[in-house]
Amino acid sequence: MSYQNILVETNDRVCVITINREAKLNALNKDTLAELHTAFEAAFADAQVGGIILTGAGKKAFVAGADISELTELNTYSATAMATGVHDDVMNLIENGPKPVIAAINGYALGGGLELAMAAHIRIAADNAKVGLPEVTLGLIPGYGGTQRLTALVGKGKALEMILTADAIDAPTAQTIGLVNQVVPADELLPKSEEILRKILSRAPLAVANAITAINAAGTTDGYATEISGFAGCFNTTDTREGIAAFLEKRKPVFTGK
């Protein structure tokens, strides 16, 4: 597949998707969002891919926000359609995907960029990164899941503070409040992200997928039922039998994803 706005490279089960609009600080326009949808669907379906790292080209920005020029002609109806499409085709696709996704935040992650990072399962930030949701400075509110995912990650009070003030915060602060998992020097960002992903890939793939589903259901009326279903379903897999046997035999398990 040939892409105009992103780069996709897979090496030994790790797929790296890079938003490649460095001159525009990797801003999310409709074409980039469409390509992200295609790339993630392909990666999730590809048996040769175990997990995905999502990052931005260059050193300045992961994604500095949405492409504001595309917002000028929107009205209530077209904005509803656009936001719904982004939710379904990109943000929810990533969050509910069966394979782990790590956002490697290599600079500014603002507005839609932070919303994209929050859709990933784990966030690793460079020490020079800054994150925030500045939409109210445009007379808007976050529309790609920001009000919901930020609240889930950092709590209602901090989410209100960040969204209502529109202030960006630095990477160490983001880690302190639970918005990012780890902060590392910029030149260690991708190696650390790959290290974490490869550790996940050494675990049972079907169990990882079930864990993602159950954690995403946390706080819903179906949360505990989803966990029980996922737990019980693992006993239909070869990997569960292998994992238990390996533990009892004091050896390293060999998982096959079956």
Image (spheres, rainbow, N blue to C red):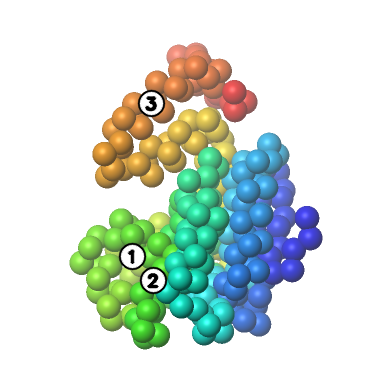
**Residue 97 visible from this viewpoint:** yes
Vertically, is 60 above or below 101?
Answer: below
Residue for badge 1: 147
**Do callouts 1 and 2 mark residues in contact (Cβ within 8 Å)?**
yes
Q: Quadrant of residue 177?
A: bottom left
Query: Position of 89 compared to 220: left or right?
Result: right
In the image, what residue type sits under mark 3? Ser
Quick one: SS at disc 3? Answer: helix
**Secondary structure beneath disc 1?**
helix
**Which residue is disc 3 drawn over?**
229
Q: Of helix, strand and loop, which one carries label 2?
A: loop
Residue 22 position within the rendered picture, expressed as x and y whole percent measured from the top left: 65, 77
Q: Nearer the viewer, residue 69 or 175?
A: 69
From the viewer's perspective, tell me whether residue 193 is left or right of residue 80.
right
Give the residue type at disc 1.
Thr
- The circle drawn on residue 3 is none
Kindly identify the residue that appears in the image at 65 percent across and 41 percent down: 45
Which residue lies at the image location 42% right of the left edge and 74% below the top edge?
76
Q: Quick one: label 1, few (<14), some, or many (20+) residues within 10 Å?
A: some
- Which quadrant of the figure contains the C terminus? top right
Gap between marks 2 and 3, in whole Å?
Answer: 33 Å
Query: Relative to 258, does residue 108 appear above or below in the rendering?
Result: below
Q: Could you tell me which residue is drawn at 53 percent across and 82 percent down? A: 73
Q: Residue at x 31, y 30 (%)?
A: 225
For label 3, count other residues whose C-alpha is less than 10 Å away and answer few (under 14), some (14-19) or many (20+).
few
Residue nearest the observer in this picture, 147 or 237: 147
Give the quadrant of residue 38: bottom right
**x and y percent of residue 198 in the render?**
58, 44
N-terminal of the pair, mark 1 or mark 2, is: 2
Residue 4, horizontal then vertical, whole percent: 74, 68
Are the residues tagged 1 and 3 within 8 Å (C-beta)? no
